Amino acid sequence: MRTTLFLILMFISLNTVANSFMSEPSCFAPNKPLIFSPNSYIERYNLDVIEYKSCIYRFIKEQEQAIILHEKSIENAKELLNSQLK
């Protein structure tokens, strides 16, 4: 009984902590150059846009992997709880 109560409280506290943190990408959007900027500025901007997109896609992939990990952890906790209640 104490183990079950402990597991329930632990699950609730972990869920609360997980929801209190929200990740944001550490990507910086490039500033579009002015209309009459030199070609070097425009080329640099185009490279920065590619880098920015890559950063955002990397962030999305990391978050999707974290979702899978959290879902597995939730299922494991549920199975552990159910096995303790039987």
Image: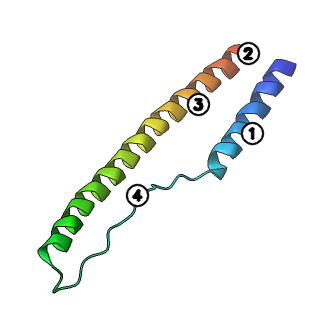
Residue 79: x, y in percent?
61, 20
Q: In which quarter of the image is the C terminus?
A: top right
Q: Nearer the viewer, mark 4 or mark 3?
A: 4
Disc on the earlier residue, 4 or 3: 4
The outermost residue toward the bottom is: 36
Q: In this view, does 12 lie above or below 33?
A: above
Task: Give the labeled residue for mark 4.
Answer: 27
Q: Nearer the viewer, mark 4 or mark 2?
A: 4
Disc on the earlier residue, 4 or 1: 1
67 lies left or right of 11: left
Q: What residue type is labelled 4?
A: Cys
Residue 55 in sight in this render = yes
Q: Which of 80 and 29 is in front in this view?
A: 29
Other residues around mark 2 within 10 Å, as few (<14) / some (14–19) / many (≥20): few
Please report the residue visible at 79 percent of the width from the left and 22 percent of the height from the top. Answer: 4
Q: Pointers 1 and 3 in contact (CB under 8 A)?
A: no
Q: Number of numbered discs present?
A: 4
Task: Give the labeled residue for mark 2.
Answer: 84
Task: Give the labeled residue for mark 3.
Answer: 74
Q: What element carries label 4?
A: loop
Q: What element carries label 3?
A: helix
